[in-house]
Amino acid sequence: MERVSEQLPSAFNVAAYYLNSNLERGNSQKVAFFYQDDTYTYDQLSRFVQCTARSLLTLGLERENRIAILLPDSPELVFAFWGAIWLGAVPVPINTACSVDEIQYILQDSRAKILLATQEWQEKLTPIQSQFLEHILLKDGDNPFLSRLTQQPDEPFPCAETSRDEPAFWLYTSGSTGKPKGVIHLHQSMVVCAEHYAKATLGLQPDDITYSVAKVPFAYGLGNTLYMPMAVGAATVLSDATNAFDVISDIQRYQPTVFFGIPSIYANLLSVQDIAPLNVSSLRLCISAAEQLPESIWQKWRETYNREICEGIGTTEFLHIFLANRLGECKPGTSGRPVPGYDVRIVDENGILCPPGEIGDLLVSGESLMLGYWNRLQETRQTLYGNTMRTGDKYLCDADGYFKFKGRKDDLFKVNGQWVSPLEIEDILHQHPQILEVAVVPESNEGEQLTQVVAYVSLKPGQDSSPELETSICKFAKQRLPHFKAPKTVRFVEQLPRTATGKIHRKLIGKIQSLAVRTH
Amino acid sequence: MDTSKAMDTLKAILADLGIPKESLHNDTLLHEDLQLDSTEIVEVALGLKRQLGISVKLEGRQDITLAQVCNRIEAVLLANSNSNHVT
């Protein structure tokens, strides 16, 4: 197969490519996105993007400078993202679920020159610690970002003549040490994912309307909402939904045809079906990614709504999905088969290809692989070699060529589609006055249920375990952590298993529990 | 059902989620103050369904207080009661 990137001209600006190609295809008056009661056509989108580029230039944003965008999915986020790329600058969308400390770190680490946020976020972040920040633009308040744009002359603004393999945008992803890592992607990256996944795998069509539960600052959400619909001239919904009830009302209102969910939202939608029934009549495709989808949820969704969920898996480093189940060929409980354009293989500790059914390390090669992590040479070297990424996932491939997730090589795990580092939770629990030692692990009953955070705890001398103490520890964590990271269960043990070098042996923890758990 | 009973039921459901009772007041906001996530909101709605037999949708776009949730509970109970009387 000819490489997608080699079909692109070497002088290539992805914002101009997608916007101009839609206008050239006659999509000027076609809806690009829905936002609350408003619709924006491709023509309006193109004009706003060019006004944004002009406005950012007047503020001194130059090629390769970063602009941090800390907004919910909204027109301003879309205009700023594409406008910065049009200008040759580098947008850095930030997840609004990040903590203040994480955002301060990202602003400092990315050296963003401009921050686009809301008044509420500005107040939370003040004083901003980054010495690189020169301007803060606000979506709301006295001089909102959209007003700035409408003050710009509505004239064509030439795009920067960027290269297809120069950095276009960054996305931050969680690191094993707790500090987010900036993942650098190129102008060609989005085109690669759109061609291989949106077009060749999903068969996304111009009359589709996509709806994504994952927000734009996530690699999964970025594709679902921003560039994949644009790649085919489809429409999307910019949603500020925060829970299942909002999603149900959005689907009723906008009638999307393609639903991009995550396992926890599928579980929640099924849980509330008696309270708020979901109208699935418009949906032709249901997709799940971000973490493993339990087979039980897949089966219940099909029984309830007569729809398959096409589960897939990708990474921020590859920008989008590289293993996917196809409609009519789904194998529940698996991540599916390789997306065209990606070489996916499982190897043993010596790098030898594993036979079907044997668990090994998942290696993936493909054109959408990141350039690297910003200012993290060692982690970049450990993760990449050539066009290949060591994902850190343990997988097996069955006799039919379907890949099944079997755990992680490191200690990270996902809850609600978001990476969790056990160290962060353990640091908090160590502050509990009765805890001596603690180890946090994920438990999912062999993939049969959604991942739960479980804390294994040994107590200080003279302290006794009890159901009341378990409740107290859960509350203690909940008051100090985002709720999805707080342990749902505490298991008391005499002592935690350790490696020969004295480190806590997490892989053994679940296995020794039956031997060592104290009875209440 | 009076407002205080609805409030007691709601507080009991939130306490079961591990929220300290001392942080639960009439003007406490579900998102801003209690930081309930999407799964916990579903747990609250399911708790109301189990304990009171009513369907209350708890959309997240507009943050609401415990008192406002109780108003919704009463409104649903009233609507159910009226529909039961229609012959």
Image: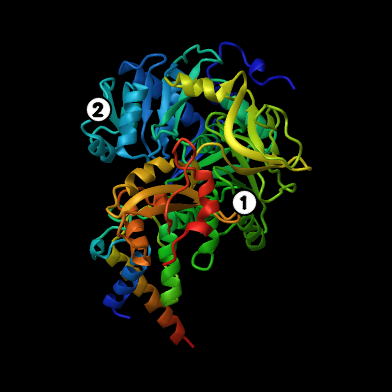
Residue, x 61% and y 13% (percent of image)? Answer: A9
The residue indicated by pointer 1 is A283
Amino acid type at mark 2: Gln
Element at label 2: loop
> Where residue A378 appears, x then y in whole percent?
47, 21
* Display colour scheme: rainbow
Q: Quadrant of residue A49?
A: top left
Q: Are marks 1 and 2 on the same chain?
A: yes
Q: Quadrant of residue B54?
A: bottom left
- The subunit letter for the residue under badge 1 reads A
Residue, x 24% and y 29% (percent of image)? Answer: A128
Q: Earlier in the sequence, mark 1 or mark 2?
A: 2
The single residue placed furthest to the left in the displayed view is A127
The residue indicated by pointer 2 is A129
Is residue B10 placed above or below A113 in the rendered structure? below
Q: How many marks?
A: 2
Frontmost residue, A82 versus A322: A322
Amino acid type at mark 1: Leu
How far is disc 1 from disc 2 in space, using C-alphas? Answer: 45 Å
Few, some or many residues within 10 Å of mark 2 (<14, 14–19, 20+): few
